[in-house]
Image (cartoon, rainbow, N blue to C red):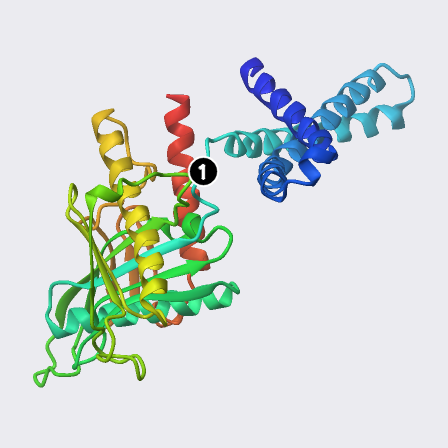
Amino acid sequence: MSIMIERLEGMVNRYHEITEMMMSPEIVSDNKQLAKLGKEQADLTQVVETYTEYKQLMQDLEDAKALLQEDDKEIKEMAELEIEQGTIRKEELLNKLEILLIPKDPNDSHNAIVEIRGAAGGDEGNIFAGDLFRMYVKYAESKGWRIETIEMDDCEAGGFALVSFMIKGDGAYGTFKFESGSHRVQRVPKTESQGRIHTSTATVLVSPEIEEEDFDIDMNDLEIETMRSSGAGGQHINKTDSAVRIVHKPTGIVVKCQDGRSQHENRLTALMTIRSRVYEERQREIEAQAGAERRSKIGTGDRSEKIRTYNYPQNRVTDHRIGYNVNQLDRIMEGRLDDMFTALQSADQQAKLAGEQS
């Protein structure tokens, strides 16, 4: 408990220190530094407010205990009730503080880059990739977040062999990072004349958007080429070398971008995407070498890990990492993902808390 209180006092001191710093002329005139400090203070606010309530409650409990020495029966009864209610609230606040003190992924507040690929099942796998794309877009739009397409390789039968896009919004990566893995669908394809249920898969990879100053990528490691864009996309398609393809030679990671209005725009988007992908790959390597678990304790975050099954005949979605089942597949595919995302985040918090206590 003393270590916990020490950490909390340090965070309160830092909160007040930031308040003073943000009033200094040097910081006020530096928009970038002001925004950085504002973000740090916002991250501390909930901890400071909860700890302040906890300290006030402890003082109130001490005062109530002193009233137990009074001769007045009514005063003693009021004090006993206050102690009973206060003790319950104390446990609630301690549990909340424990969760708030779990180290946060610094990338959680970033934008998210999502890549979906049709995998096993041929056309049906690609169609399902399209279904997942629409599901994520509907959820993001419900949050007021913006979608920017990076690459689309659509298929004649429908859906996508590959679709990658950025979700722009505060906390997008922290929300979507648990979606990395293999998603399995069980249903009767539209092309199935015998009514047989098929199993197909699509894979999802989620990376945080990483700014250039946060992760330096060696340009000598990149192979950059331009080409003519392909597929639907407007009058410029197949007329100018506007598409950009970048290969990161040490890892073999490939990014292609063609949806921008110019080669310059596509180049910037492709560089941003490859930086984020290489960063994510490096994080995996570092954690593997250290023998540590992935940031997400409820899964590896690897594209090949089977994480979820969408069973259409039974209208059921199952997340295999946490044993989450919901018989509302139709609502899930309409982008109503809040309950499932909350369950995943809660399971992740509990796993991290158990890890800290062990």
Of residues 286 and 119, which is closer to you in this image? Answer: 286
Residue in the image at 26% along x and 37% along y: 282
Residue at image mark 1: 106
Q: Position of residue 84 (x, y in %)?
A: 70, 29
The quadrant holding residue 55 is top right
| Residue 113 seen in the figure | yes
Of residues 244 and 124, which is closer to you in this image? Answer: 244
Please say if 128 is above or below 17. Answer: below
324 left or right of 5 in image: left
The quadrant holding residue 327 is bottom left
Of residues 253 and 103, which is closer to you in this image? Answer: 253
316 left or right of 67 in image: left
Q: Amino acid at mark 1?
A: Pro
Q: Quadrant of the C terminus?
A: top left
Q: Position of residue 356 (x, y in %)?
A: 41, 24
Disc 1 on helix, strand or loop?
loop
The quadrant holding residue 316 is bottom left
171 left or right of 300 in image: right
Residue in the image at 28% along x and 48% along y: 277
Please say if 140 is above or below 42. Answer: below
Residue in the image at 26% along x and 30% along y: 286
Please say if 289 is above or below 71. Answer: below
Residue neighbourhood size for the residue with mark 1, other residues' Cα within 10 Å, grouped as few (<14), some (14–19), many (≥20): few
Q: Quadrant of the N terminus?
A: top right
Please say if 10 is above or below 168. Answer: above
54 left or right of 288 in image: right
Residue in the image at 34% along x and 69% along y: 262
Q: How many marks?
A: 1
Which residue is at the far right? 72
